[in-house]
Image (spheres, rainbow, N blue to C red):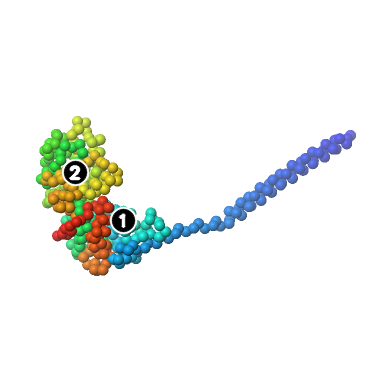
């Protein structure tokens, strides 16, 4: 017999089940509504981000005075050592808008290096290059292309020979360099007045500026011995400095007096050490004359050379490249040469013949 209490109990269960179902339905509905809201929101296009503000180049007073504008600024390239000067010229010629001095659109970021920049100039792909004295190979390439080049001296430089600071040797001459690098008939530092110890000659790649100076000024008709090129070639100016300094860490047992011999450009050493700090290297005197800013400028140091602004001789007289080259000879231009780490000129030497 179904009692009243049983009926009430069943009704309570049914009511509870209904309430649970209602709650589940409401929860699912809210979730779907929320998802729909998120989906709808995701389809609303995001507000476009502000486009980077264009930087305007404005010619400086100096640029305006010589007729340089952002539109006619010449294409300038050069050696690794002149990249700081190339960049300083650009910044001296232009102001940037909105005080954005740290952002320079069009600022050259790398150099093509000596030989490559000559090739680009001869081909007409650049207008002006800043480089040291040319090699014989440059003259041959220009002559073959039927291009005559014009050299305007803008800076002082010198080829220098370097070794580790601990090496007691302090001087070297042309004959000794030839016997070390070409003939390999001198292989011990004792032949140069030092202690008994192996000479480890380091050379540069054939198309480098310092290699050109070694051939022009010291080797003459002699060539670097292939054994030196095969075992001890550095393709980077900084690599030459590092090898000369760090070879001591890799010397064989019993070779405490073995030192490297290398060559580079005087002012490149100065600017490198001003950036990274003093290195354990030293420059050697050549024929008894030490390379200094004074002996290089006065041409007393035998291996003193120049940096040149080089252009094709057929450029019109009013070409912007000529204007930049002439500006580099002014007091303001020479200041930039010096601040970039090169030797400024007090006397303008004759261009190479």
In the rendered image, which residue does mark 2 sit on? 283
> Residue 66: x percent and y percent?
28, 66
Q: Earlier in the sequence, mark 2 or mark 1?
A: 1
Asked whether the viewer can see residue 102, the reply is yes
- Across and down, in percent, residue 174 comes to 12, 46
Residue 75 picture quarter = bottom left
Q: Secondary structure at mark 1?
A: helix
Residue 195 screen position, x and y as percent: 14, 34
Between residues 342 and 112, which one lies in front from this camera angle?
342
Please tell me whether residue 122 is drawn above or below residue 214 in the rendered image.
below
- In this picture, residue 168 sits left or right of residue 47: left
Crowd around label 2: few <14 · some 14–19 · many ≥20 (10 Å): many
Which circle marks residue 87 in the picture?
1
Percent x, y for residue 98? 42, 59
> In the rendered image, which quarter contains the C terminus?
bottom left
Rounded to the nearest whole Å, what is the CA distance between mark 2 and mark 1?
Answer: 28 Å
């Amino acid at each position: 017999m179904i009692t009243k209490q049983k009926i009430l109990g069943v009704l309570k269960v049914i009511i509870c089940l209904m309430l649970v179902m209602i709650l589940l339905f409401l929860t699912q509905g809210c979730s779907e509504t929320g998802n729909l809201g998120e989906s709808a929101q995701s389809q609303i296009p995001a507000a476009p981000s502000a486009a980077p503000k264009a930087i305007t180049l404005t010619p400086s007073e100096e640029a305006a005075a010589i007729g340089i504008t952002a539109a006619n600024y010449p294409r300038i390239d050069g050696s690794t050592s002149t990249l700081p000067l190339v960049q300083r010229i650009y910044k001296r010629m232009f102001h940037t808008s909105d005080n954005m001095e740290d952002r320079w659109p069009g600022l050259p970021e790398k150099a093509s290096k000596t030989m490559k920049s000559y090739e680009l100039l001869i081909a007409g792909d650049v207008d002006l290059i800043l480089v040291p004295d040319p090699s014989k190979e440059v003259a041959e390439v220009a002559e073959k292309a039927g291009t005559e080049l014009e050299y305007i001296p803008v800076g002082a430089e010198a080829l220098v020979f370097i070794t580790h600071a601990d090496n007691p040797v302090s001087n070297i001459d042309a004959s000794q360099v030839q016997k070390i690098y070409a003939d390999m008939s001198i292989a011990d530092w004792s032949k140069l007045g030092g202690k008994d110890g192996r000479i480890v000659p380091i050379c540069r790649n054939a198309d480098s500026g310092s290699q050109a100076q070694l051939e022009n000024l010291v080797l003459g008709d002699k060539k670097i011995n292939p054994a030196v090129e095969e075992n001890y070639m550095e393709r980077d100016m900084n690599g030459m400095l590092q090898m000369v300094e760090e070879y001591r860490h890799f010397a064989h047992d019993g070779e405490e007096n073995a030192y490297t011999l290398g060559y580079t450009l005087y002012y490149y050493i100065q600017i490198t050490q001003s950036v990274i700090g003093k290195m354990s290297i030293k420059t050697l005197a050549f024929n008894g004359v030490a390379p200094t800013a004074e002996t290089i400028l006065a041409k007393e140091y035998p291996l003193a050379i120049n940096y040149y602004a080089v252009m094709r001789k057929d450029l019109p007289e009013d070409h912007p490249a000529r204007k930049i080259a002439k500006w580099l000879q002014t007091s303001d231009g020479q200041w930039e040469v010096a601040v970039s780490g090169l030797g400024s000129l007090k006397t303008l030497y004759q261009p190479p013949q």
